[in-house]
Image (cartoon, helix red, strand yellow):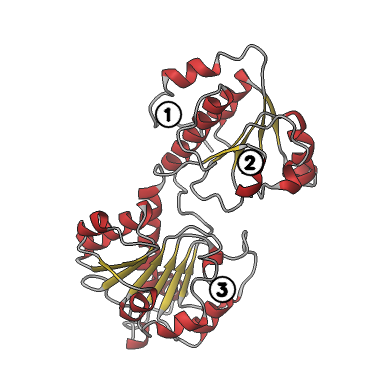
Amino acid sequence: MTDLHIAPELTTETEHLSQKNHEKKKVVIFSQVFPEFEEKLRQDFDVIKINPKLGDVNQQIREAVTNAHGMIGAGRLLGKEQLKTAQHLEIVSSVSVGYDNYDVDYLKSRQIQLAHTPHVLTETTADTAFALLMSAARRIPELDQWTRQGQWQHTVSAGQFGMDIHGKTLGIIGLGHIGSAIARRGYYGFNMNIKYHGRREKLETAQQFQAEYLSLEELLTSSDFIVVAVDLNAQTKHLLGQAEFALMKSTSVLVNISRGAVIDEEALIEALQNQQIFGAGLDVFAQEPLQSSKLFELNNVVVTPHIGSATEATRYAMNKLAYENLVLALNGQKPKYSVV
């Protein structure tokens, strides 16, 4: 990635704290971070960078964390197996909002802080959700290929028509920050009726969009578009499976920008194959990276490679916040956003 200067300079407080180190602490970079922040880390800390090209990543991590005080990165499983050798680890700073890759209970038991980067990716991820919704509804990828292949010799037939979006019912599972941003787009941009489901009602948030709280079953049966925006945990794993797809309208579109395991992927494939639902837009999958899948054989699903926050501006902001969380923790301060 290029070293962009599109966000404000780091806070004076954080810069001051990073300079307080008399004896440099050790930091492990376990995935790519922006060059600007890697350089800053190298100025103030002893840095070890994990390199997948050098072999077993877990073994590299086990060796690197032995005397490490901090870690920064994303996309790696981190728990007892990877961190059992750590003697001085104070914080894992994740360049992500989700933290299902981390064994939170283990980190708590070791009194290792876990920080993440919420809010800075909210709007970008909501954009991605709506891009998937619109692409699946209007069959954009399918018709793009049809056009490129020279098949546009006559106007599209009824069998190629898409679904209207404006004025339809949008059901959101998880009306958190991202879910609310999706609701705002649907309500104000497309005059959609907003329904939502979650662990509890959110009356103040819901009032902005005249959103109605429904049970999961009611939401599935009444919504034209269903967007999943929940955290992955024991309660949400395979939240949607065969029984839930059976409740959905045959004209409905499902969008998932949360985590792949929230959906029973095999059940979804079956529902799409049987045209039990109209289509789906998926940015996350049970297995990532996804090298092959029956999903690739279907023309009623849009797939993207987990790009919810993948813009230069948003990834820069995430890197900046993860860097600040790390530096604050290593200087005895509270990170801006902590999970543990």
Q: Residue at x 60, y 48 (%)?
A: 104
Mark closer to the observer (2, 3): 3
- Measured as percent of width and height from the top left, residue 50 is found at 71, 38
Can residue 297 be seen? yes
Q: In the figure, is residue 149 to the left or right of 38?
A: left
Callout 3: few (<14), some (14-19), or many (20+) C-alpha neighbours within 10 Å? Answer: many
Give the vertical position of 184 relative to 241 (above or below): above
Q: Which residue is mark 2?
A: 31
**What's the residue type where badge 1 is placed?**
His
- Measured as percent of width and height from the top left, residue 267 is found at 55, 80
Q: Which residue is mark 1?
A: 5
**What's the residue type where badge 2 is placed?**
Ser
Q: Residue at x 37, y 67 (%)?
A: 133
Q: In the figure, is residue 175 to the left or right of 3?
A: left
Secondary element at image label 2: loop
Tell me which numbered mark, 2 or 1, is placed earlier along the sequence.
1
Given residues 108 and 230, the one toward you in this image is: 108
Q: Quadrant of residue 261?
A: bottom right
Question: From mark 2 to mark 1, how far is it between C-alphas?
Answer: 21 Å
Q: Residue at x 66, y 43 (%)?
A: 109
Q: In the figure, is residue 265 to the left or right of 177?
A: right
On residue 265, the disc is 3
Q: In the figure, is residue 274 to the left or right of 22?
A: left
Mark closer to the observer (2, 1): 2
Secondary element at image label 3: helix
